[in-house]
Image (spheres, rainbow, N blue to C red):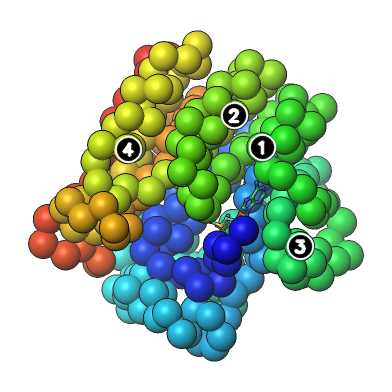
Amino acid sequence: MNYRHAYHAGNFADCVKHALFVALLRAMTRKDKPFLILDTHAGIGRYDVSAGPAARTGEWRNGIEKVLAARPEALSDYVALIDQLGLYPGSPAIAAALLRAGDRLVACELHPEDAKALRTAFAGVPNVAVHERDGYTALRAFLPPPERRGLILIDPPYERPDEFPVLANALETAHEKFSTGVFAAWYPIKHRAPARSFFETLKLTRMKDVIAASFWLREPLDPARLNGCGLVIVNPPFRFAEAALPMLEAFVTVLGEPGAGCAVERLIDE
Ligand SMILES: C[S@@+](CC[C@H](N)C(=O)[O-])C[C@H]1O[C@@H](n2cnc3c(N)ncnc32)[C@H](O)[C@@H]1O
């Protein structure tokens, strides 16, 4: 495991994922009934982008720094949360900030040092549980949740060459166990073919009601660069697709280079 998220915290891909994640969490909290948030690949929780690994790569300067400077209306909820939380929040910190007294966060992280940091970050927080374990097996262990409502974020590092098929398989299996869960799976866009092939694989599963929200910073032509990213969402909340598009368009305006763009597409009907 060479990937350390601290080098990439606050980059454009993190911002896109987190802004959409905030919108998903808001949609889940619109109903009174408690729910589980399962973060299968959680990272360390909070990141100081002005020092250490993130400062060394400077990736955040082309991400959260520009978003905070531009503060587009469509991203106002996400921006307000960043302002409120101080250190750049990773997905578990965002989830912890938005969950209510009856909701629960289960955050899994496999890297021993990162799991330790994550555990420290949430020590004593009552409805947050940190597990040092494989996020894919966590899908089998924690689903379906007793609450019968859940938002599951699957955010792997794509270090392994077979991450796309492994993810597609894990999604299908998890969906079989918990067909009403809201699943959000992050994917990279380097060039178009791998993401398209991932979508085609998903279409061959028995899942229903699947959309993909994609953003590309520049024309995705160079397979050696992270040119874009997106979230595949299974069982998206009511009108989520309509809410996601202006958010992605704001990222195009604020961060886009020539050839930037975005799309929200339906992969599988309800
Ligand atoms: C992209 S980062 C997660 C970022 C985090 N979700 C966020 O948005 O703030 C992926 C994380 O998954 C961890 N990881 C890698 N393989 C894993 C596995 N099989 N199970 C759980 N965590 C894993 C890595 O150590 C890394 O911290």
Marks 2,1: beta carbons within 8 A: yes
C-alpha distance separating marks 4 and 2: 17 Å
Could you give the CA–CA distance between mark 3 and mark 2, rounded to whole angstroms?
22 Å
Q: Of the residues under marks 1 and 4, which one precedes in the sequence? A: 1
Ligand 1, by image quadrant, is: bottom right
From the Cβ of disc 1, is ligand 1 less than 8 Å away? Answer: yes
Q: Which residue is mark 2?
A: 170
Q: Which mark is residue 194?
A: 4
Q: Tell me if residue 154 can be seen.
A: yes
Within-10-Å neighbours for mark 3: few <14, some 14–19, many 20+: few
Secondary structure of the residue carrying numbered label 1: helix
Helix, strand or loop at label 4? It is helix
Q: Amino acid at mark 4?
A: Pro
Q: Say whether disc 3 or disc 4 marks the residue closer to the N-terminus.
A: 3
Residue at the bottom extreme, as displayed: 51
* x and y, in percent, of residue 127 in the image: 83, 51
Please, what secondary structure does the residue beneath circle 2 have? helix
Q: Secondary structure at mark 3?
A: helix
